[in-house]
Image: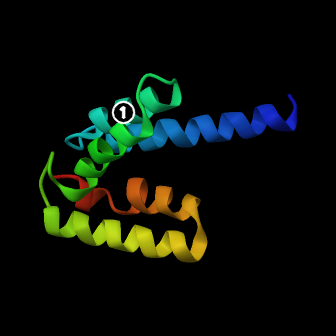
Amino acid sequence: MSADNGQNEVLAAFMDEMKSSMADVEGVDDFTETARSVVVGEMAVDEAVPRMMAFFTGETAGNPVERARLVQLAQEIKSRAGLVPIVLLSFSTCRDVLKS
């Protein structure tokens, strides 16, 4: 097995764990389907962003105040540390905020 395959396996396991941990969060299926649609070219980014932000702002689920704080925190983290910490923040450490 090459190093690339090992890295792919680790990433795949991590993504499976994230998917499993978020399975009961309202709106996550639409969020991930929207992201998939952009990646495969079925939807424009400009169309996807409002749909995906509706998930984070609580328009499609509960906890709008907490979710707004999560968005603010993610924006600040991105400006200081980049994208990867936002993914970890949003989908693993802040599950309680995203779960309504």
Judging from the image, what secondary structure is the residue with disc 1 in? Answer: helix
Quarter of the picture containing the N terminus is top right
The residue that disc 1 covers is 34
The answer to which quarter of the image holds residue 75 is bottom left
- Give percent across and percent down for residue 6: 77, 36
Residue depicted at 49% across the width and 35% down the height: 16
- Give percent across and percent down for residue 61: 14, 48
Residue depicted at 42% across the width and 27% down the height: 37
Left or right: 59 as drawn, with respect to 69: left
- Give percent across and percent down for residue 96: 25, 60
Left or right: 54 as drawn, with respect to 70: left
- Give percent across and percent down for residue 66: 20, 68
Residue depicted at 24% across the width and 67% down the height: 68
> 49 or 98: which is nearer to us?
49
Q: Residues within 10 Å of mark 1 (few under 14, many from 20)?
A: many
Left or right: 9 as drawn, with respect to 24: right
Residue depicted at 27% across the width and 42% down the height: 51
